[in-house]
Image (cartoon, rainbow, N blue to C red):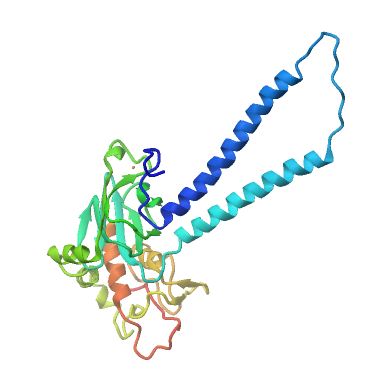
């Protein structure tokens, strides 16, 4: 099918899976379209009215027919459902060892950040064969990150993080589109994804002159926003320690428990009163408007980089995020 310009190149592990499902949908649709149109023409001729006084035979249903036309479509659509759901779930569950990339969409460009500190606009360089996980948000309206060759399309929504992943299988240069109408220059919100041999990728990573890793940038921001005045590493501050927070379950004052993922950390920075940690006061001011989405991502990455708390039992609840006075 590659020679037909109808289908984009297959350049990720998802591409053949998605295409096979599409072929199945097309086959079912074409088969029934042809069968129905064929039957219409056949019946129109075979059972045409031959005289004005002719009356057709009256029939009162047929059990076998009714069972057949219920069971067969049911089976075909259940195949569509389970096959589609399995691809969907697979696409929404990145493997643990995936390469992390952060994406911020804004009218009208893509901003991409690597953990090593490299930042790109409308270009993404990634290594061949490695799973890549994207954590994405928007500074303004809804965008959609679309790489046809990878069969990857995921909405990028303001106010929250969305995640997707893919594993490139072929080196090359692939189109990146915004697939959600987002304003007058939506059509210009495009870019390129470069899939490089791992060695070339290492060279590319080392080639730039980034201002420290993303976590380092986050650490600087953490200091400059004076977060460290309250969030002390040993937990002695007025606010929960952030050491070992990421991935832990946090006990809230409301009695609920939340998992400290990227979305929770982001929310705690921008809307600190949304989820108060048990045992702490809602003292923390909001940083909405003071930190850009890229800044929030740097802070998230910094907090992720803070190792587990010394002496804390694995899997323990660590109090976190929140409150403090300035
Ligand atoms: Cu961004 Cu369309």
Q: Would residue 185 be found to the left or right of residue 146 on screen?
A: left
Q: Percent from the top left, x then y, of residue 147?
A: 35, 49
Using the image as rendered, state which of residue 220 and residue 97 is in the foreground.
97
Q: Which residue appears at 43% of the width and 86% of the height?
A: 314
Q: Would residue 292 be found to the left or right of residue 162 on screen?
A: left
Q: Which residue appears at 21% of the width and 56% of the height?
A: 120
Task: Give residue 31's quadrant in the image.
Answer: top right
Using the image as rendered, state which of residue 199 and residue 80 is in the foreground.
199
Q: Is residue 54 above or below residue 176?
A: above
Which quarter shows the N terminus? top left
Is residue 287 at all visible to an observer of this figure?
Answer: no
Is residue 44 at all visible to an observer of this figure?
Answer: yes
Q: Would residue 283 be found to the left or right of residue 31 on screen?
A: left
Residue with the most extreme top position: 52
Residue with the most extreme bottom position: 311
Label total for image? 0
Using the image as rendered, state which of residue 194 and residue 215 is in the foreground.
194
Q: Which residue appears at 67% of the width and 49% of the height?
A: 75
Q: Which residue appears at 29% of the width and 63% of the height?
A: 296
Q: Percent from the top left, x then y, of residue 137?
A: 35, 55
Q: Percent from the top left, x then y, of residue 40?
A: 68, 25
Which quarter shows the C terminus? bottom left
Q: Percent from the top left, x then y, of residue 312?
A: 40, 88
Using the image as rendered, state which of residue 73 and residue 235 is in the foreground.
73
Q: Is residue 51 above or below residue 23?
A: above
Q: Is residue 141 above or below residue 61?
A: below
């Amino acid at each position: 099918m590659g020679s037909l310009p109808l289908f984009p190149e297959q350049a990720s592990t998802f591409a053949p899976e998605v295409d096979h499902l599409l072929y199945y949908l097309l086959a079912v649709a074409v088969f029934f379209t042809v069968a129905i149109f064929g039957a219409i023409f056949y019946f129109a001729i075979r059972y045409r009215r031959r005289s004005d006084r002719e009356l057709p035979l009256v029939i009162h249903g047929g059990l076998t027919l009714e069972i057949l036309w219920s069971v067969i479509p049911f089976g075909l659509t259940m195949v569509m459902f389970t096959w589609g759901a399995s691809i969907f779930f697979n696409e929404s569950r990145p493997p643990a060892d995936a390469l992390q990339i952060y994406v911020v969409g804004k009218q009208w460009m893509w901003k991409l950040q690597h953990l090593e500190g490299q930042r790109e606009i409308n270009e993404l360089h990634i290594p061949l064969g490695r799973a890549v996980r994207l954590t994405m948000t928007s500074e303004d309206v809804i965008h959609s990150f679309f790489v046809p060759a990878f069969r990857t399309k995921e909405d990028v929504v303001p106010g929250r993080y969305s995640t997707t992943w893919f594993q490139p299988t072929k080196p090359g240069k692939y189109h990146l589109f915004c697939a959600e109408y987002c304003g007058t220059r939506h059509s210009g919100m495009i870019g390129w994804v470069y899939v490089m041999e791992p060695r070339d990728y290492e060279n590319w990573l080392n080639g730039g002159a980034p201002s420290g890793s993303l976590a380092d940038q986050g650490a600087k921001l953490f200091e400059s926003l004076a977060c460290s005045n309250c969030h002390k590493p040993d937990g002695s501050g007025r606010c929960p320690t952030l050491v070992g927070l990421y991935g832990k379950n946090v006990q809230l004052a409301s009695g609920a428990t939340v998992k400290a993922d990227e979305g929770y950390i982001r929310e705690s920075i921008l809307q600190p009163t949304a989820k108060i940690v048990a045992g702490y006061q809602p003292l923390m001011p909001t940083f909405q408007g003071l930190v850009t989405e890229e800044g929030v991502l740097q802070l998230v990455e910094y907090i992720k980089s803070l190792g587990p708390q010394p002496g804390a039992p694995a899997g323990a609840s660590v109090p976190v995020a929140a409150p403090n006075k300035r």
